[in-house]
Image: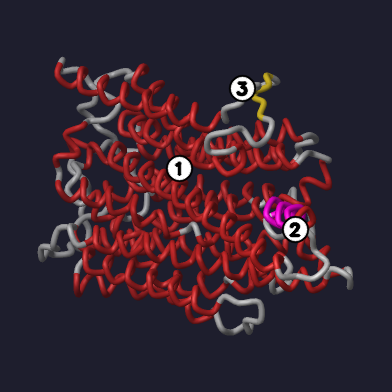
Amino acid sequence: MPEQGRARWWGLLAISLGVATIIVDATIVNVAVPAIIRDLGITATDAQWVQEAYTLVFAALLLVAGRFADRAGRRRTFVTGVVVFVAASVLAAVAGSGEALIGARVLQGLGGAMILPTSLSLLNATFTGREKGVAFAIWGSTIGGAAALGPLLGGWLTTELSWRWAFGINVPVGALVVAATLVLVRESRDERAERGLDWLGALLSVVGLTGVVFALIEGRTYGWWEREKPFSLFGADWTAAISPVPVAALVGLVTLAGFVAHQVRRDRAGRAALLDLSLFRIGSFRNAVVAAAIVSLGEFGLLFALPLWYQNVLGYSAFDTGLALLPLAVGSFLASGLGAPLVQRWGATRVVQLGVAAELAGIAGLGTVVAPDTSWWAPLGYLFLYGVGVGLATAQLTGVSLREVPVRQSGQGSGVQSTARQLGSALGIAVLGTVLFAGLGGTLGDRLAGQPGVDPAQREQIVAAVRESAGAAIGGLAADPRTAPIAQEAKAALSDATRYAAFCAAGFLLIGLLACARLPRDRPEPSPPSRRPAPATTSGG
């Protein structure tokens, strides 16, 4: 193995590339969905499950995967996750039906859940002192840049080649990540962990998180209380008048309460638990996890609304939308170079606060320029500022959460932190989506009330079509000279709704910034040239 002092930084790049792969894949698929529908002949519901099957499995397994990595070995778990993710990508690339593609996405969710928390615990076990802040800066900027570059890459692959390449591109990248990780990254694990796994705890956590995440991401589709659309699972139809969403939420919350009670009982009995609740007695960990969940409410939810506005109001193609969002990626990448010296100078906590403030300013600024006649250049500066904030805040908040977590429990801590972010993101998208589509329906209805020649029945029909198509129906209205004035009103309504969502996201980030005030102050700490993890918590690999 190469000299560990230099190799660990190359290993960091390998780990970051592995994480970037799952982030890019998620955003690429969003762009490729229309082409998938046309090619496979699947329904809109099936297409929705192509996206959400991954999200459900990914979010539900983060906690279990983090704990498993502590016991089985973090490098081994990371590499296994990449292999599973790549194998699932191959299955997705050759899928001939919607069912096969959804099954492949489930496997991708499993692989992704093994990659993300394990990447964090590997960084926590490999770097110490202020170097850890630099490492997390690189890791975080990779995520922010990947999230913004994904739509651009997805638009190009889908347009120039095929949607299948959106999955096929993962194969060579994954092979490179596996080879580099095995050569450059040291193995580490919790040597004091008991054999076996808390299987009941794992089952309770997976069922509970699946129920809660399903409710958050499907509430707008199936109704928050009354069933608004048919729902079926594994061929069984949901026939009750009540929506499956509140039932899933109730089952999830009750199961999670049972999970916590089970963990407490195992802890009192002196038996190993899936989640060591003593972690929450660590102030830096507890406060950072809460702050991460709150910040995530507003951090990425707007990326759901902006592409709809660009494409349906400004008339951008999928590729042009990716180009429009490129300043976000540039800002996030630059933050990696900027974040390292800032962490060395001010410490991670201040950099987190600066990053969240930049995100807040960027999103609030975007809300002021969203309009039907917005110039292409008007959002660029705000997107860049938002990207810088993501690059600074995301990584360092993660680093702060793990700062005082014992290395042997890095997987648990990473799993909790990642799960909190996923729940925050899911809740944020649910809230912002509700604000967006409720605002779209209400504003468009008011605008059409004064439109000559549009009776109440037609108004309801138009509002429903625009809202349920997420604005895609605007193009058809604009193409017909008779309905072109209605299309202009719809564009104005979608712009208003996007602006409401932006200000709502800014409000979440303001609360997150206040939560960051409770993060611990940084203590001056030397940055050694090279430190290996303590022998008690690592094993040669």
Determine the CA span between mark 2 and mark 3: 30 Å
Residue 422: where, in percent of width, then height?
43, 45
Q: Earlier in the sequence, mark 2 or mark 3?
A: 3
- Contact between marks 2 and 3 (CB within 8 A): the answer is no
Which residue is depicted at the point 69% across and 50% down?
468
* Residue 9 or residue 5, whichever sits in front: 9
What x and y, as percent, mark residue 387? 45, 70
Rounded to the nearest angstrom, the CA distance separating label 2 from label 1 is 48 Å
Question: Is any atom of residue 456 visible in this view?
Answer: yes
The amino acid pointed to by label 3 is Ala
User: Can residue 465 be found in the magenta stretch?
Assistant: yes
Q: In the rendered structure, are the residues bearing label 2 and label 1 in contact, judged by CB atoms less than 8 Å apart? A: no
How many angstroms separate mark 3 from mark 1 (CA)?
Answer: 38 Å
- For mark 1, give the secondary structure: helix
Q: Which residue is mark 1?
A: 115
Q: Position of residue 390 (x, y in %)?
A: 40, 65
Tag nearer the camera, 2 or 3: 2
- Pointer 1: residues within 10 angstroms few (<14), some, or many (20+)? many
Which residue is labeled 2 in the image? 459
Q: Quadrant of residue 343?
A: bottom left
**Seen in the image, is 384 located left or right of residue 220?**
left
For mark 2, give the secondary structure. Answer: helix
Name which residue type carries label 1: Ile
Residue 151 among those drawn in magenta: no
Residue type at tag 2: Arg
- Span colored in magenta: 460-469
Q: How many marks?
A: 3
Camera-nearest label, 3 or 1: 3
- Residue under the image location 65 percent in, 31 percent down: 103
